[in-house]
Image (cartoon, coloured by chain):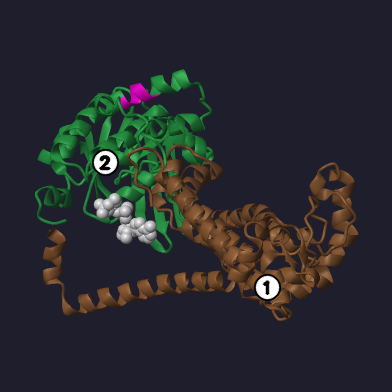
Chain colours: A green, B brown
Amino acid sequence: MGQSLSIRQLEAWYGTNQTLKGINMEIAANQVTAIIGPSGCGKSTFVRCINRMHETLPGSKVKGEIILNGESIYGQDPVSLRKTVGMVFQKPNPFPSMTIFENVVAGVKLNGMRNRQNLQTIAEKSLRMAALWDEVKDRLNYSGMSLSGGQQQRLCIARALAVEPSVLLMDEPASALDPIATMRIEELVGQLKSEYTIVIVTHNMQQAARIADTTAFFLNGELVEHGPTSEIFTNPRDKRTEDYITGRFG
Amino acid sequence: MSTDNNRLYESMGDKVLRYVTLLMAILVVILMIWIGWQMFSSSQESIQHFGWAFITSRVWDPVHHIFGALPFIYGTIVTSVVALIIAAPIGISVAIFLNEMAPSTIRKVVAFLVELLAAIPSVVYGLWGIFVLAPVLRQSVEPWLTKWFGFIPWFKGAPVGFDMFGGGIILAIMILPTITSISREVMAAVPTAHREAALALGATKWEMIRLSVLSYSKSGILGSIMLGLGRALGETMAVTMVIGNMPKISSSLFSSAYSMAAVIANEFTEATYSLYLSSCIEIGLILFGITLLLNIFARLLVWSVARGPKGGHLV
Ligand SMILES: Nc1ncnc2c1ncn2[C@@H]1O[C@H](COP(=O)(O)OP(=O)(O)OP(=O)(O)O)[C@@H](O)[C@H]1O
Ligand SMILES: [Mg+2]
């Protein structure tokens, strides 16, 4: 099941450069939340705060509070938090020295699962969910790098799904993909939301309109507006949102 | 045919660059072959005289005109292997520590100090070996090892201090900078994206190092070890000062021995007749051959490690 997130007064820095300036936002469970906004406005930084990846960079700093299912994420061990909050990156990053199979089960193995039979079941289930199974089922012991960019991205999605997180963060997962691969990932997101809470960063506003239940518009490190997707796109409350979605800037 | 097309459009500068670099590459190859050939032809006398027995004979007796290289080959290989066994784990650990754990000020200072080790002349290492290392080995380390691990043939025997163990330790210190700095560079080159892939799955720091850093850089680390081994095989001065310079073959590391580079350096000037001289040169030829074979083997090893699973294209 998905879990809800509550972000309170979140601020983030790279060195002295403040990237997030006090974000307050509620993310409902089992919904797709799209994050949109111009390049450099802090979308990636925002999702990287949710699984505490931001603070792994040297010189970075975070302030504020994120509550996951009623519990502060800063009171938890980041290692176990990241098993609950999975992430798919903008650029596909399969482990280059591992086979397709090993890539999918890498996270499960970290959790101590060793039984070959179980691993195979998990791998097949995750690859099916990521709509990759049919393409790779005959060559699971090939390198993950032997796949196309779009397949690699679905492999990374399968890898994230295999550990069964409650929240799935996706940072522009389709930005490097062709329209067909993009469509498959969008379909996938639609199917996954019954079991996951999904936060997806996208530059593509049609994509946000197609897949997201709610959409949040970020600008210069601030959350300008967050509401039901249909409202954001047809009847935005803020002038800046309207300018952005109508393409007048950004 | 597309290459021909490309050449047609090649600019004058590119053409010059291509021929100049090609010339340099050919020059290096010629130099290698020339050195090898020179040694081969200068060692003809001993090759004719002893044949393959030169390599398998244990006797090195200039007074009776009998020469065999086995003790030197043995001493060189054993000290180099001891050096690797000590230096590889330490060097890789230091590289991991510096790259992944140390705060950046400590990283800079320690990395500088380790690289400084490479700048110390080997004769200084030799002096340190004579005045510091050998006495410590003789008085404390070796008796202790004999007491507790004496059942292993390597650690048997009366400690002398000037032995293969000391030679191996000196070499280990000398190749440590090579292994550390090259491993550190390949580890630093691991893209952040690969590290984050592991962390985002809920990997601990060590699991991240294992999954992303080490598996990504293992061929480079292997390469650094092989470079270190190459340096150990050829090192002359420091080894000759601590190894004891006795052409013996013993299973005990606590026994004096001799190395190929050391015997050449020590006896070349004393080689008063041509067979003696020719034998020294043949030892050089063997050292050259071993180094060459080792490098070919290392290349193959690095390739096979880098290839990874089917369809991959690492490195
Ligand atoms: N590793 C970093 N070091 C320093 N500054 C950074 C780093 N990453 C991002 N920034 C800065 O933080 C700000 C927000 O970056 P972020 O990556 O969150 O933007 P984004 O909204 O995801 O942009 P894009 O749509 O281009 O991916 C930018 O101004 C950027 O320059
Ligand atoms: Mg981004």
Name the image quarter holding residue B164: bottom right
Around disc 2, counting alpha carbons within 10 Å, would you say few (fewer than 14), some (14 to 19), or many (20 or more)?
Answer: many
Q: Is residue B210 magenta?
A: no
User: Residue B100: where, in percent of width, then height?
Assistant: 54, 54
User: Residue A36: where, in percent of width, then height?
Assistant: 22, 46
Q: Mark 2 falls within which chain?
A: A
Residue A213 in sight in this render: no
Q: Residue at x 12, y 52 (%)?
A: A243
Q: Residue at x 30, y 25 (%)?
A: A137
| Mark linked to residue A173 | 2
Disc 1: residue Cβ within 8 A of ligand 1's nearest atom:
no
Q: Residue at x 62, y 72 (%)?
A: B281
User: Residue B190: where, in percent of width, then height?
Assistant: 43, 53
| The N terminus of chain B: image quadrant | bottom left
Disc 2: residue Cβ within 8 A of ligand 2's nearest atom:
no
Q: Read off the magenta span.
A: A123-127
Disc 1 residue type (three-letter): Leu
Q: Mark 1 falls within which chain?
A: B
Q: Quick check: A76 left or right of B173? A: left
Query: For this rendering, which residue is in front, A122 or A233?
Result: A122
Mark 2 in CB contact with mark 1 (< 8 angstroms): no
Residue B159 in sight in this render: yes
| Mark linked to residue B275 | 1
